[in-house]
Amino acid sequence: MARPDFEEPLLTVGEVAALLHVSNMTVYRLIKSGQLTAIRVGKNYRIRRIEVERYLDDRAVQVEDKA
């Protein structure tokens, strides 16, 4: 079983919302839909920064230059 990386800071829903420039509710919806992986700590969620990066990478689009 892989050991979690405890040196990587966990982000709160509010911190992720600020990074993505969305509301807290949007982050909760992403977690509930399975699009963003989170860890439940008590009644709160924590998200690894790498999960936020993975979420963004999965949604990146390539724009072609039509010059």
Image (spheres, helix red, strand yellow):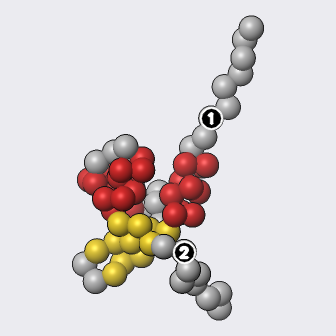
Q: Give neighbour class at mark 1: few <14, some 14-19, many 20+ (Cα, 10 Å).
A: few
Picture disc at residue 53: none
Three-letter residue code for mark 2? Glu
Is residue 37 left or right of 43 when viewed as pictured? right
Residue at left offset 34%, top offset 72%:
45
Whole-angstrom CA distance, mark 2 to mark 1, is 27 Å
Q: Quadrant of the N terminus?
A: bottom right
Picture disc at residue 61: 1
Q: Which mark lies nearer to you, 2 or 1?
A: 2
Residue at left offset 31%, top offset 59%:
14
Sequence-wise first label, 2 or 1: 2
Is residue 51 left or right of 64 when viewed as pictured? left
| Residue 46 x %, y % | 39, 71
- In the displayed structure, would residue 50 be above or below residue 21? below
Is residue 18 left or right of 35 when viewed as pictured? left
Residue at left offset 72%, top offset 11%:
66
User: Is residue 8 or residue 65 the one in the foreground?
Assistant: 8
Residue on which the image places disc 2: 8
Disc 2 secondary structure class: loop
